[in-house]
Amino acid sequence: MEVISIERSTYEELLTSFNSFVTQMKAIAGRGTDKRLGEWLDNQDVCQILNISPRTLQTLRQNGTLAYSQIKHKTYYKPEDIERIISLVEIKKKDTHSYRCHQRKGGSGVNELIMPHNTGVKRVLENMKEVLALYKNVTGNYRPLLDGERYMTDREVAEILKVSRRTLQEYRNDRVLPYISLGGKVLYRESDLEKVLESCYHPAR
């Protein structure tokens, strides 16, 4: 087996750059399908992109570092807001890593063999698959607008908000989301969904 040595700082920078690329690709994919609704990320997306725990993510929200929007108990984030704090999160990680290295006896470095099952490597591979899926979605699901407005189905909105269709029904019952009912078919204006998310938006302090 051939082994290529790479400094941890270089490895972490590669991961950060690729995760940033994935975030931008998601935004481009949103524009590429003629949608006015921007791409919104949920807690799981952001934790994977920043490689942080849900608890750390909650701290970033509570201390005003990270802006977010919230519908009921579901939290959403704009990709551009994630972009703004990527460097901040990485700086904190590097500071922590440098401190730990300094505390090692004799100051000698410890080599680590990064295998395919490594968390960072697995995330990169998963993100690569996601980027390919986004490309197929952009090229295969193009839909023209009706008088400048896009109308979405129950299934599409559930996918965008990353909730079940039953939860979506609860949103309708509680008048959280505006909708149109035509002969038993439920449709949502994309602009209405964007307004709801923006109205619940908490900017960073």
Image (cartoon, grey):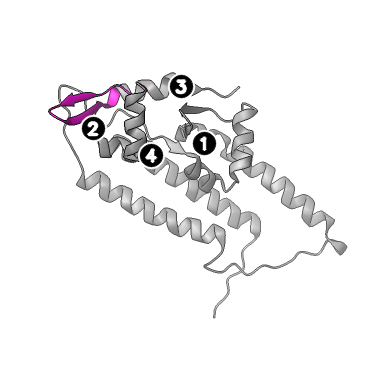
The segment highlighted magenta reads 176-191
Helix, strand or loop under label 4: loop
Please identify the quadrant where the N terminus is shown.
Answer: bottom right
Q: Residues within 10 Å of mark 2 (few under 14, many from 20)?
A: some
Helix, strand or loop under label 2: strand
Going 38% across and 39% down the picture, which residue do you hit?
163
Mark nearer the N terminus (1 vs 2): 1
Q: Residues within 10 Å of mark 4 (few under 14, many from 20)?
A: few
Closer to viewer: mark 2 or mark 4? 4
180 part of magenta stretch: yes
**On the image, numbered disc 3 is attached to which residue?**
200
Q: Which mark is residue 163?
A: 4
Marks 2 and 4 sit apart, C-alpha to C-alpha, by: 15 Å
Marks 3 and 1 sit apart, C-alpha to C-alpha, by: 17 Å
In the foreground, 70 or 90: 70
Mark nearer the N terminus (3 vs 4): 4
Marks 4 and 1 sit apart, C-alpha to C-alpha, by: 21 Å
